[in-house]
Image (cartoon, rainbow, N blue to C red):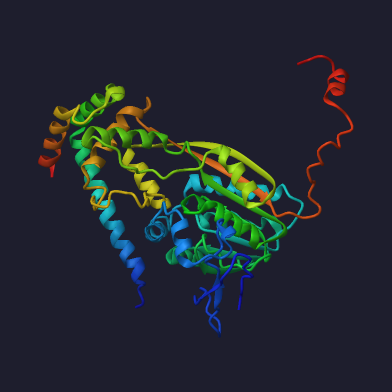
């Protein structure tokens, strides 16, 4: 059966991308508290944003995400 | 079979096969020396390569469009349909009919589907850089009253004979060209006199929330900024682009669409389905997959917390600039010669009272 190679590749791409998207969505849903803390930290410091300004919240979020997988 | 009479210099013969196979393979030539730097009078290859600015990676864009053809095969995108509908509506505002039309890449499927016989089009050429996109358009063709041919080609090297089409439509495609003035000039050359050019491109206000969120995420995590959104034309540039390309009676109008998503991830999914993801040459290639990148996970959280509305959805702005232009023809009203006025403004002012 003729199966165009480009379509099959794109199909795999879709599976991979939607798999990672839903994984990421799932992880962010479990870590919603840490995500919200990080988001509000950055949102409050918009005008003086610098590197690692919200490092504490980011590490908490990273910790949560790595332990969810 | 089709030669472009290039006024700018050398002509290169390229062999490509059109989508509909016929007995002989159609060979046509595309002039590489079509460019706005034509003042050089057909300079050498090296001169052209160095004078052309490369902002976008066109090969990557083609790959994006292949994937977009797959992702959007069964669904109708309301945003893209709204833009295409707006564009095609303008055909009903003209008394003229357009027997032959060319549709350049962007949302080809939407244009083909929503055409519904407007503009009196009898012969339609669909062109895109992505083979898969063309294939899915051909498979979706349900209206056999219009003779449609499909072509894989690049908007920057338009393989169309001069003065051969009445109408050129491009819905959300031209903002990915490296040389937008050059593409528009080629479009103008391809049009017959009194032909119409209709285009919709994304403008500078598009995705400004995403731009802010990307900048903040990058600065907080990495301390610097990397370009993630393409440079987009401003509204004031659109008029200049049309006059520079040589269109007469130019018209520009702007529409802003605010699309709501459940989360930033949905926005990214939508962008991928439209084929509008990042294809800047300057993008950070070290980050292999955007989903694994540290920046991306914080990007979604920042976007959601900064721009969330009361009902939990997040908005994204899309500014669409619609451009219309006609190829000059003797029937178009011309600007009057300076000094040929017969009535002065002071007379008009006196006539209609002293209301300032």
Q: Is residue B174 above or below residue B252?
A: below
Q: Residue at x 61, y 43 (%)?
A: B240
Quarter of image, res B349: top right
Question: Where does residue A3 sit, x and y in percent of width and height?
Answer: 35, 73
Q: Is residue B277 above or below residue A63?
A: below
Can residue B142 be seen?
no
Along the viewing direction, whichever of B222 and B5 lies nearer the viewer = B5
Q: Residue at x 73, y 54 (%)?
A: B328
Quarter of image, res A63: top left
Question: Where does residue A42 sit, x and y in percent of width and height?
Answer: 26, 27
Question: Where does residue B64 sit, x and y in percent of width and height?
Answer: 38, 57
Question: Where does residue B63 sit, x and y in percent of width and height?
Answer: 37, 60
Can residue A26 be seen?
yes
Quick one: quadrant of the C terminus of chain B? top right
**B345 lies left or right of A30:** right
Q: Residue at x 54, y 68 (%)?
A: B150
**B217 lies left or right of B166:** left
Along the viewing direction, whichever of B65 and B138 lies nearer the viewer = B65
Q: Residue furthest bottom?
A: B23
Quick one: quadrant of the N terminus of chain B? bottom right
Along the viewing direction, whichever of B218 and B87 lies nearer the viewer = B218
């Amino acid at each position: 059966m003729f199966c165009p190679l480009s379509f099959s590749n794109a199909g795999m791409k879709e599976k991979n991308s939607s798999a990672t998207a839903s994984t990421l969505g799932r992880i962010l849903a479990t870590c919603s508290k840490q995500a919200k803390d990080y988001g509000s930290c950055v949102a409050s410091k918009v005008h003086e944003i610098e590197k690692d300004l919200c490092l504490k919240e980011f590490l908490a979020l990273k910790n949560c995400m790595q332990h969810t997988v | 079979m089709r030669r472009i009479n290039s006024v700018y210099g050398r002509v290169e013969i390229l062999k490509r096969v059109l989508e509909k196979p016929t007995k002989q393979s159609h060979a046509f030539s595309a002039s590489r020396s079509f460019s706005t730097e034509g003042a050089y009078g057909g300079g050498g290859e090296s001169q052209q390569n160095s004078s052309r600015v490369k902002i976008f990676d066109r090969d990557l864009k083609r790959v994006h469009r292949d994937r977009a053809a797959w992702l959007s095969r069964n669904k109708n995108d309301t945003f893209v349909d709204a833009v295409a509908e707006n564009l095609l509506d303008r055909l009903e505002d003209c008394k003229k009919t357009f027997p032959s039309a060319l549709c350049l890449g962007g949302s080809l499927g939407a244009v083909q589907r929503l055409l519904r016989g407007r503009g009196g089009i009898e012969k339609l050429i669909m062109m895109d850089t992505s083979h898969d996109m063309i294939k899915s358009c051909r498979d979706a063709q349900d209206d056999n009253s219009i003779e449609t041919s499909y072509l894989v080609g690049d908007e920057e090297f338009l393989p169309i004979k001069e003065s051969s089409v009445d109408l050129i439509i491009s819905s959300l495609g031209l903002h990915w060209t490296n040389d937008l003035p050059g593409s528009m000039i080629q479009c103008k050359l391809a049009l017959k006199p009194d032909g119409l050019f209709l285009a919709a491109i994304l403008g500078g206000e598009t995705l400004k929330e995403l731009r802010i969120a990307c900048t903040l995420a990058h600065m907080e995590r990495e301390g610097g900024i990397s370009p993630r959104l393409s440079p987009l034309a401003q509204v004031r540039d659109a008029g200049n682009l049309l006059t520079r390309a040589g269109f007469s009676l130019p018209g520009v109008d702007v529409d802003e669409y605010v699309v709501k998503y459940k989360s930033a991830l949905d926005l990214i999914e939508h962008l991928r389905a439209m084929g509008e993801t990042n294809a800047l040459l300057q993008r950070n290639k070290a980050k292999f997959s955007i989903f694994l990148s540290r920046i991306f996970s914080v990007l979604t959280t920042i976007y959601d917390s900064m721009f969330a509305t009361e009902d939990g959805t997040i908005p994204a702005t899309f500014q669409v600039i619609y451009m219309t232009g006609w190829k000059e023809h003797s029937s178009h009203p011309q600007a009057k010669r300076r000094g040929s006025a017969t009535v002065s403004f002071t007379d008009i002012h006196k006539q209609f009272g002293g209301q300032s």
